[in-house]
Image: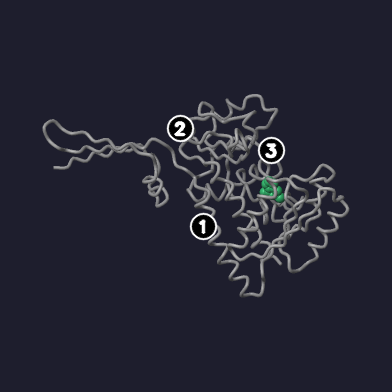
Amino acid sequence: MFYLNIRYHYKHDITPIGLHNFFTQIFKFRTSIFQGLNIYKPEIILMTGIKIDGKEIAQTVKDRVKKAVEELKKQGINPCLATILVGDNQASATYVKNKHKACEEVGIITKDYKLSSGITQFELNKIIVELNNDKSIHGILVQLPLPNQLDEFVTTSRISPLKDVDGLTPHNVGLLAMKKAVLVACTPLGVMEMFDYHNIELEGKNIVLINRSNLIGKPLYHLLLARNATVITCHSKTKNIKELCQLADIVITAVGDRSKFTLTPDMIKKDAIVIDVAISKYKEKLVGDIDYDQIIQKASYATPVPGGVGPMTVAMLLKNTITAASLS
Ligand code: GUN
């Protein structure tokens, strides 16, 4: 005789993704032997929320992009991304290398401009204008941050809005604010893709954003607002971050300095959704703003670092390059 008692603490619809996560969650499998009888009584208790797996979701985006690249090639368009890396910032060099590798995987051609750290604004602008005028190039990305003598606004504003795969030009930022966006910053787009992949409803949700940068906080604010969420943007001068987070259905954090800030479980409400956009080195490890293993005990969904938002940024760059190529 076999007695099966499966208990599960799971409050979400069992969609195919939910089902997958259901079986991949940590569970307790308890056996007990009834008095005198060899009867197993397994008990499955789900202990944690659901991991939002950036690698898995990014792969689905890459698969779609790969097909789009094939279609564009049939029409005689060979999608091409030009990257500009100024100076010898090691982290930036690694990011750019990863972007090239991902392009290669999906059939996007890349042009790699590695410029000396001493380049002047005038010289950099001239290169950007040449790339704007080059019909074989569809996307232009200037890796940030730039050395001190170069101005990020002056530099990114030079990029043609039609080739602006980072969504940083005033034109594209304006379109986003008017809900008419074509090219949007990659990391915010990646976060939206994660919500959609898991069918997470945003309308009416209270969302706290801990970042106000041009690349993350501001574009995310507009994307979330356009989906009828109520969005609060926090920053270094916000006085009551903990209290605001405790009220949030979703917390999106992108501080990136663990010596100054960690989003701890006591700062979120039960079953909140936590998206960790940060990545930095802390105590010789790559970390985000959260301790994933702790947060996932309380959150309904959370992203790990690495393997969370990072792969999504790269995947959405590929998507934006295809969008730019189809505009050409
Ligand atoms: N530096 C860090 N993230 C990014 C990004 O998404 N785009 C660019 N251009 N630079 C970055």
Residue 260 is tagged as: none
Taking 7 as reference, is 243 above or below it? above
Indicate the quadrant containing the C terminus: top left, top right, bottom left or bottom right. Answer: bottom right
270 to the left or right of 192 = left
Residue position for label 2? 298
Crowding around mark 1 (Cα neighbors within 10 Å: few <14, some 14 to 19, many 20+) is: some
Q: CA distance from mark 2 to mark 1?
A: 28 Å
Residue type at tag 3: Arg
Q: As rendered, which of 178 and 254 lies closer to the eye?
A: 254
- Look at label 2 and name its amino acid: Lys
What residue lies at 81% left-to-right and 54% top-to-bottom?
A: 158
Secondary element at image label 2? loop
Residue 175 is situated, as x and y percent measured from the top left of the image, at: 71, 52
Q: Residue at x 86, y 50 (%)?
A: 121
Locate residue 101: give its quadrant.
bottom right
Q: How many marks?
A: 3
Name the mark on residue 212.
Answer: 3
| Residue holding disc 1 | 60
Left or right: 33, with 276 as reference point? left
Disc 1, SS = helix
Say what amino acid the circle numbered 1 marks: Thr
Give how far across and how far down residue 128 sits, in percent: 81, 58
Residue 229 in view, yes or no: yes
Secondary structure of the residue carrying tag 3 is loop
Identify the mark nearer the N-term, 2 or 1: 1
The x, y position of residue 116, in whole percent, is 81, 51
Q: Label 2 to label 3, Cα distance in Å?
A: 26 Å
| 10 Å crowding of disc 2: few (<14), some (14-19), many (20+) | many
Q: Is residue 83 above or below residue 28?
A: below
